[in-house]
Image: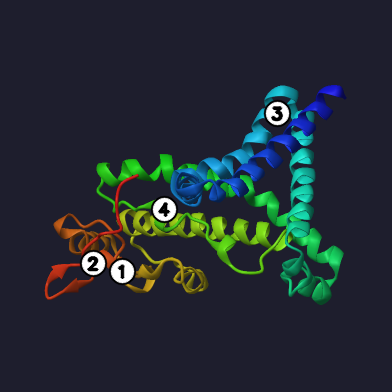
């Protein structure tokens, strides 16, 4: 029991100290502001997210197995609740003003709203694993089969902390969604290339085609009909992948201006 309490206590302290450092950085002049910006995108954000989310779980499990994991998660929850209260008290005007959490509490009820939002937190490890895959799985494909590279900082970043009036509960969950949507959108973009490169064939299920075409526009932009044949598939691959451009068929890099490929200033390997 002592070990579990120690794990939970250390997690609470480490998270509150980490949050305090993040709040302090912008007040340390130009170097502090630069470091603060670095933590808002790319690898800096990845390290910060890891520190606050999965690192405590990994350490807790390593020290105390499954009970250690539960102790670490308990420490994370308690640490977050403490920070939420402290941040709200430090921003009394925003705390008393219009709030997302209060509006939704009135809409569906406090317990239903808070239970639902905490359930969404269960997806954090999943998004973290997706982010790992974006670093480990996709980059080799950019030089092995020439899929287009991406500058992940253009996708995976957070900026909602700049929105006036976000405080406490509202701020932390909006930042979670800020990070989550970037990770998921980048992963979807990468999967568009994978699908159109290896499997440019429409699904037999019209319902699935209709549902998936939002995330995979090439379903209606070049994929071979389900009643086609392999000759059709080969023809599409030869036409669409000619010239070494292996991006998905509707990728912006395929858009031309006066016959010249669009410049790819924002794309780099990571």
Q: Earlier in the sequence, mark 4 or mark 2?
A: 4
* Residue that carries the numbered disc 3 in the rendered image: 61
User: Residue at position x 14%, y 58% from top?
Assistant: 243
Q: Which mark is residue 250?
A: 1
Q: Which mark is residue 241?
A: none
Rounded to the nearest angstrom, the CA distance separating label 3 from label 2 is: 47 Å
Of 84 and 131, the residue lying toward us: 84
Of 99 and 226, the residue lying toward us: 99
Q: Which mark is residue 254?
A: 2
Count residues near mark 2 (Cα–Cα under 10 Å), then give few for <14, some for 14-19, many for 20+: some
Rounded to the nearest angstrom, the CA distance separating label 2 from label 1 is: 7 Å
Rounded to the nearest angstrom, the CA distance separating label 3 from label 1 is: 44 Å
Q: Secondary structure at mark 1?
A: loop
Closer to the eye: label 4 or 3: 4
Residue 232, given in percent of the width and then of the height, sits at: 25, 65
Q: Is residue 35 above or below residue 182?
A: above
Q: Seen in the image, is 259 located left or right of residue 20?
A: left
Q: Earlier in the sequence, mark 4 or mark 3?
A: 3
Q: Secondary structure at mark 2?
A: helix
Residue 130, given in percent of the width and then of the height, sits at: 51, 47
* Residue 120 in view: yes
Q: Is residue 94 above or below residue 32?
A: below
Rounded to the nearest angstrom, the CA distance separating label 4 from label 2 is: 22 Å
* Residue that carries the numbered disc 4 in the rendered image: 153
> Mark 3 and 2 residues: CB-CB less than 8 Å, in contact?
no
Q: Earlier in the sequence, mark 4 or mark 1?
A: 4
């Amino acid at each position: 029991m002592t070990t579990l309490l120690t794990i939970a206590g250390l997690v609470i302290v480490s998270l509150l100290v980490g949050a305090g450092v993040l709040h302090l950085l912008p007040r340390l002049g130009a170097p502090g502001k630069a470091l603060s910006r670095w933590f808002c995108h790319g690898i800096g954000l990845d390290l910060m997210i890891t520190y606050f989310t999965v690192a405590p779980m990994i350490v807790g499990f390593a020290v105390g197995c499954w009970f250690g994991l539960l102790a670490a998660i308990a420490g994370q929850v308690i640490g977050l609740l403490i920070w939420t209260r402290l941040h709200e008290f430090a921003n009394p005007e925003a705390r008393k003003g219009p709030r997302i959490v209060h509006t939704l509490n009135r809409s569906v009820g406090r317990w239903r709203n808070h239970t639902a939002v905490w359930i969404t937190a269960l997806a954090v490890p999943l998004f973290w694993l997706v982010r790992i895959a974006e670093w480990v799985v996709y980059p080799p494909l950019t030089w092995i089969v020439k899929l287009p590279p991406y500058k992940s900082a253009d996708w995976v970043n957070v900026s909602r902390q700049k929105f006036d009036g976000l405080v406490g509960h509202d701020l932390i969950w909006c930042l979670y969604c800020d990070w989550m949507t970037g990770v998921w959108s980048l992963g979807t973009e990468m999967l568009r290339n994978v699908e159109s490169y290896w499997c440019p064939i429409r699904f037999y299920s019209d319902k699935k085609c209709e549902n998936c075409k939002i995330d995979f526009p090439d379903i209606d932009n070049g994929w071979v009909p389900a009643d086609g044949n392999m000759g059709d598939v080969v023809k599409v691959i030869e036409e669409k992948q000619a010239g070494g451009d292996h991006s998905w068929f509707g990728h912006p890099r395929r858009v031309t201006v006066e016959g010249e490929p669009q410049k790819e200033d924002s794309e780099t390997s990571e």
